[in-house]
Image: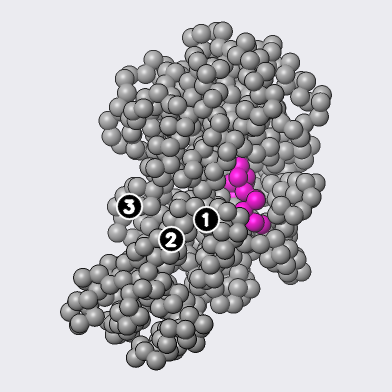
Amino acid sequence: MKFGMRNSPSGPSPFESPKVTAPALLPVLSQYWGFHAFRPLQEEAMTAILDGRDSVVVLPTGSGKSLCFQAPALVAPQDQSRRLAIVVSPLIALMKDQVDGLREAGVPARCLNSAQSSGERADAMQAIRSGECRLLYVSPERLVGDGGEAFRRMLGQVGVRFVAVDEAHCISQWGHDFRPEYRLLGQVRNDFPAASFHAFTATATVRVRHDIGVQLGLQNPSVLVGPFDRPNLTYRVLPRHEMRAQLNTVLARHQGEAGIIYCLSRREVDELAAALAGTGLRALPYHAGLSDDERHAHQEAFLDERADVMVATVAFGMGIDRPDVRFVIHAGAPRSVEHYQQEAGRAGRDGAPAECVLISSPADFLRWRSLLEANGELSDANRQHLRDIERYVAATQCRHRALVEYFGQQHAAPSCGACDWCLGELEAIPEPVVVAQKVLSCVVRTGQRFGVGHVTAVLAGQTTESVLKRGHEGLSTFGLLKESPIEDIRGFIDQLTHAGYLLRAGEPYPTVQLTAEGRELMRGSGTCVLHRQPRRPERRRTKAGSRTGRMVAAPGSADEALLAALRALRLSLARERRVPAYVIFHDATLAELASARPRTLSALREVVGIGERKAATFGAQILDVIAATGAAT
């Protein structure tokens, strides 16, 4: 298989001129979604589908990835016998929310899943067979599980135009959410030989992208990779010391705003959710230990804006499309950089500023290793994922740069202005060379045969079983950094590794060793810089603290009153239809309505996010609210 790579936003196209271009797509975007222009790489992704060319599309959360396979399904096909587009989606909640939103916009979409009643399934099947359904959402299990062969045969008789695999990183064994059912999707290609196949994901390294293409059997695919950077997000990493106090500091910056807090265990979720609710916050728990009804109720409360904070394990989040999440806190390290990018990426989907805080300690990584080992999942890939997220936590460089470079891209800006490093929130330690020499000397004294944990214990003066067994309490380097917290010592080792003075070598348990540069520094030749978290972090009105990105207007202004009235109307319409509020309108649409104050249906259609169906369905009520608020002011 040959890949043609194209990275956004510039660079020559590796494929021929398209057969169907923007003129055919823009009317569809305007009619159904109220959009009048493409976002980066959307046109290229849609054109690949319309040309019948396979593709791998990697676009970050909030960049309009779903629209890339939804809009082409509504452009009239050249072959009228193949009109159905199939979307493979991993979660029932994800497909339900997307289909609800599509149908509100007038798109003939359906889904088939195990949570539907027999009547709902029969209605969907009738729409498929009659040709009314143009966009069908199904789970991978529905396609390749029991009964899948007969189901695929029926779809083949209807005529499949293309298959879009959402969350396609689940296909790859090197991905962070590998699912065996996804691995079987390559078999589907034989049932729909005339259909093109398209893989979509928000997180995939070069290795994962290649594996996706191989497993799906893609033929000379167009590979479109958008920028991984999310400049509206402010990243911070904090060593854990007083978790509740640290959480309260972050929450104080986001009073009344929506956010997600990820914990590592169900017990931690329940305890924290109860504690936050006890302080008056509208907080709810979410984890696999709750009943299906409880999980569904809590998720719906969050999406309907009846709850502000969701405290959850990683079981929560995939496909959650609430755009106004202003903060994501990890109360414990995730198991990979990919997980972190995806989970943190649920903040700021509307493009407004949001904050992502990772609170971690070395114990998190030991915990992950033990858990994976106990479950038989401590593979080479998962070991590497853990090392990578450890390096991210310990890094003393721009967080945006670290994330972008992990996914194989460059970050040109010298300072992002939106992370703890670039905002100057980390503290440079005095006499860094002396501290570095103590660390390097300890590595040598212990024989360069031990991992980070053992070296840290010796420097901290801890009489652990391992230290005593080897007599390392008698080394001259024992306790040299006993005045420093454990997380600082470990951070120094990680920083020296990142700077090239140390390296970690060996499998499966890497040992810490000196490099040539490290030997020179230990002898007094050269310099270095080491940082740590401030001893008493001050409250800072930083980018995330002072500019929250909420829909704001001058207090007492007409815009403020109109925004409140429009939000109330949106909530009423959403509850009436039993869909999340953002399915009716996103915050950005309400903000533009409050600013532009359209007075006619034609003017209403100029507002981004209002297509023909929504203008016809909700237009009169919106105009009434605008007129009434204008009269009142």
Identify the residue position indicated by label 2 in the image: 508
In the displayed structure image, the side of residue 131 where residue 393 appears, left or right: left
Q: Residues within 10 Å of mark 2 (few under 14, many from 20)?
A: few
In the displayed structure image, the side of residue 376 where residue 3 appears, left or right: left
Residue 622, quarter of picture: top right
Q: How is the image coloured?
A: one colour
In the rendered structure, which segment of residues is drawn in magenta?
312-324
x, y percent for residue 366: 53, 67
Residue displayed at 61% across by 42% down: 319
Distance in Å between CA atoms under marks 3 and 1:
32 Å
Q: In terms of secondary structure, what is the magenta stretch mainly?
A: loop
Give the vertical position of 470 relative to 188 (above or below): below
Which is nearer the N-term, disc 2 or disc 1?
1
Inspect this view and state whether residue 320 appears: yes
Identify the residue position indicated by label 1 in the image: 378
Mark 2 residue type? Pro
Give the vertical position of 491 relative to 345 (above or below): below
Asked if disc 3 and disc 2 are in contact, CB closer than 8 Å, the reply is no
Label 3 vs label 2, nearer the camera: 2
Instruction: Assign a secondary structure to mark 3.
Output: loop
x, y percent for residue 79: 51, 8
Mark 1 residue type? Leu
- Screen quadrant of the N terminus: top left
